[in-house]
Image (cartoon, rainbow, N blue to C red):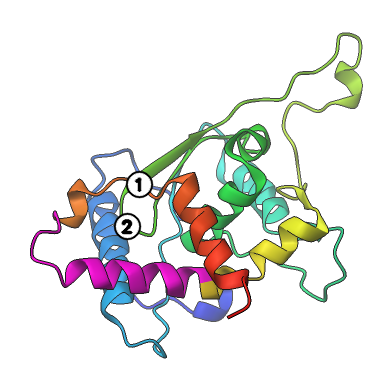
Amino acid sequence: MALDAAQAPYLVELQGANDPWFATSVHWAVEEAVQSWLAEPDQATPHRVGGWLQSAAFGPELADALTGCLRLSTQAHTTARYLRLADRRVLSLAVHVLGESSVARRLPPVQHWHWLDAHAAWRSLSARPGHTPEGDHAAQPKTPSQQPLATFTSAQWSQMTQGEAVHTHMTRLIRQRLTHHDTPPPAEWSPVSTAQWQAALTGVMSPS
């Protein structure tokens, strides 16, 4: 089924984990990850499968909340207005830069957001509604609408702008590991850790 890339991202409703499109989409996501590992340095590999969301919200409410998350808010001076969370590489980096707890507080009405990290390992983030002081319920709507994921500080946005270079660096390291016969299969690799993200960022941002 051909989809117009200019209309992306798409929100597709699946009927639970047994929906055949769930297995198909996971297969596509793994293929995208493997292609990025094996691609030449100057070849870009699109990551079209952003992730899998679990939510009790109806489509319009969920789409409205996601639209807000995709809006960029930052203290840095930039002409960018869009946060490409539909690309799971951007989501992974944003979770690292902002911190899991910060992103988790902004997830509702999404209860769980699942995606594959740079090693094609399954990752999940569960919503953690923020604490509302007693007597302030009227000022704190239960379901955020059209609100950005977070407001990035200048330093945080500086890290986000290095995303392409960071992921190129990480896929190069993965490709090097694949050339060694004693490397375990990707399914047995550990998910990308905070230390690995930090090392990748440091390696990219440090002067050569």
Residue 109, can we see it? yes
Identified at 75% across, 19% down, the residue is 131
Q: Split into 4 quadrants, where in the image is the N terminus?
A: bottom left
Residue furthest front as drawn: 208
| Depicted 12 relative to depicted 81: above or below | above
Identified at 68% across, 51% down, the residue is 69
Disc 1 marks a residue whose amino acid type is: Pro
Magenta span of residues = 166-184
Rounded to the nearest angstrom, the CA distance separating label 1 from label 2 is: 6 Å
Confirm or deny contact between disc 1 and disc 2 (CB under 8 A). Answer: yes
Identified at 90% across, 20% down, the residue is 138
User: Residue 172: image x %, image y %?
Assistant: 35, 74
The disc, 1 or 2, on the residue closer to the chain's N-terminal end is: 2
User: Residue 125: image x %, image y %?
Assistant: 49, 37
Does the stretch in magenta take in 69?
no
Residue furthest bottom as drawn: 42
User: Residue 36: image x %, image y %?
Assistant: 33, 75
Disc 2 marks a residue whose amino acid type is: His
On the image, numbered disc 2 is attached to which residue? 119
| Depicted 46 relative to depicted 61: above or below | below
Magenta stretch, main secondary structure, is helix
Lateral position of residue 122 relative to residue 163, left or right: left
On the image, numbered disc 1 is attached to which residue? 191
State the SS at label 1.
Answer: loop
Does the stretch in magenta take in 178?
yes
Residue 11, can we see it? no
Lateral position of residue 162 relative to residue 35, left or right: right
Lateral position of residue 184 relative to residue 168, left or right: left
Q: How crowded is mark 1: few (under 14 residues within 10 Å), some or many (20 or more)?
A: some
Task: From the viewer's side, name the closer residue of 189 and 204.
Answer: 204
Q: Quadrant of residue 144?
A: top right
User: Residue 18: image x %, image y %?
Assistant: 23, 40
